[in-house]
Amino acid sequence: MANTLIDGLKERISKAITINQSVGIVFPGNNYSDLVQALFEYMYSRPEDAWVYVTITRPYENIIKQFGDLSNNKNIKFIDCISRAAGISKVDPNCIFIESPTMLEKLGLEIINIFKKVDEDTNKYLIIDSLSNLIIYNDPEIVTEFFYHMINKTRVRNIHTVTLAIEEEVDKYLNKLIYLNDKILKVRDSFI
Amino acid sequence: MGKPFKKIESGDHTVWITQPNEVESLLKRRETAFNVAKGKLADSSGNIETVMQTAEAFGRGLFSDFIKKKSDVWTMKKWVKPAVENVFNPMGTAATFTKITEDEAKSLIFRCRLHEESNEPHMASLFTYGFLRGMLLSAFPDGELLMGSAMAQGAPMIEFTFKANAIDKDRLERERIKKNFTTDTKKSEE
């Protein structure tokens, strides 16, 4: 069952991300593990592309525990916005640690800096995990401003974005933000 | 020991993040209690109530040893601080508190060592619920612990609402949790 779900998600993500510049994925909280698994499998299957995975949901060390050593996947870079705030002092060359999830200007700069080092011809993808969590730590108006800027910046630089949002936490702010994307995927077991 | 929380502010918005700082003796104590609960589950042919009772007793013990002396009259604000400082942080639990008032607190646990190390996510979620409930009800006999989402069920975080005074609907929560985890825990035990 889990494999079918993950394969179905991978297929939908693959189709949406290829055609659209920005994709928002709204999913029930209990499908988080499957969705992230599908995203990682998709990233592994595209080693020629450049990926930046921004985590505000879980510390980078948890991602490593789940998916193993990612140091061989040089095309996947991480930005961890939560570890330092929780006093977790792990260091990893594959990951940039931001002091606080409220430092959105720094987050934006780090994202663009990573992509600046990537060849123009390479496909570039940004994953934000998740908008729901950005809103937990930040004033929703500030997140709105950040997300507008981010979407515009990535469009100009031809960076595809995938933004996650947990369905149960979608409020008026999140709803407005998620619809800034070109395509919305609503994850339901029965849709896959 | 440092401050139990880091306060994070953005505009009018404030949350508090725990500062995990593992203490081996407490981790060992939890591991022992968790193993006792697993043993009782096996001996009772999968009776979830035994896990809940063991976990709650463990939580009451933690309250007695690490929290009780901090106050005679409890409010949620008074309870959260020593609970985080003396239990959450030494157990390596990373959580964001999105609300702390005199009678209610809400937390999202995003790093739980028991989940990471036990390889039994359903047992770990059930046990975590049980011991936190034991800790809470020791201070607030009329309170209740509500569980919104669980890592064991695929969510990225465990969501807890700590209530000093339960309403009628809240009083069904313990049974709801037991029912939710009954099938899953039996499966992982097999």
Image (cartoon, coloured by chain):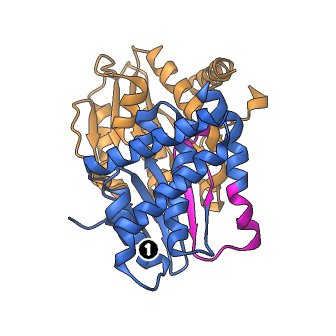
Q: Classify 10 Å Cα crowding around label 1: few (below 14), some (14-19), many (20 and above).
A: many
Say above or below: B148 vs A69: below
Magenta stretch contains residue B129: no
A124 vs A103, nearest the viewer: A103
B16 vs B53, nearest the viewer: B53
> Residue reaching furthest front?
B43
Q: Which residue appears at 40% of the width and 14% of the height? A: A47
Which quarter of the rendered picture does the C terminus of chain B lie within?
top right
Q: Which chain is orange?
A: A
A87 vs A76, nearest the viewer: A87
Where does the image place residue A77, in percent across and percent down from the top left?
A: 33, 30
Magenta stretch contains residue B166: yes
Q: Which residue appears at 40% of the width and 27% of the height? A: A51
Tell me if residue B177 can be seen: yes
Residue B184 placement: quadrant: top right
Which quarter of the rendered picture does the N terminus of chain B lie within?
bottom left
Where does the image place residue A157, in percent across and percent down from the top left?
A: 40, 34
Q: What colour denotes chain B?
A: blue
Q: Which residue appears at 40% of the width and 34% of the height? A: B117
Would residue A172 appear left or right of A40 to someone viewing this image?
Answer: right
Could you tell me which chain the residue with mark 1 belongs to? B
Callout 1 secondary element: helix
Residue B46 placement: quadrant: top right
A1 vs A105, nearest the viewer: A1
Amino acid of disc 1: Trp
* Segment colored magenta: B146-174
Say above or below: B177 vs A43: below
Query: According to the image, label 1 marks what residue?
Result: B79
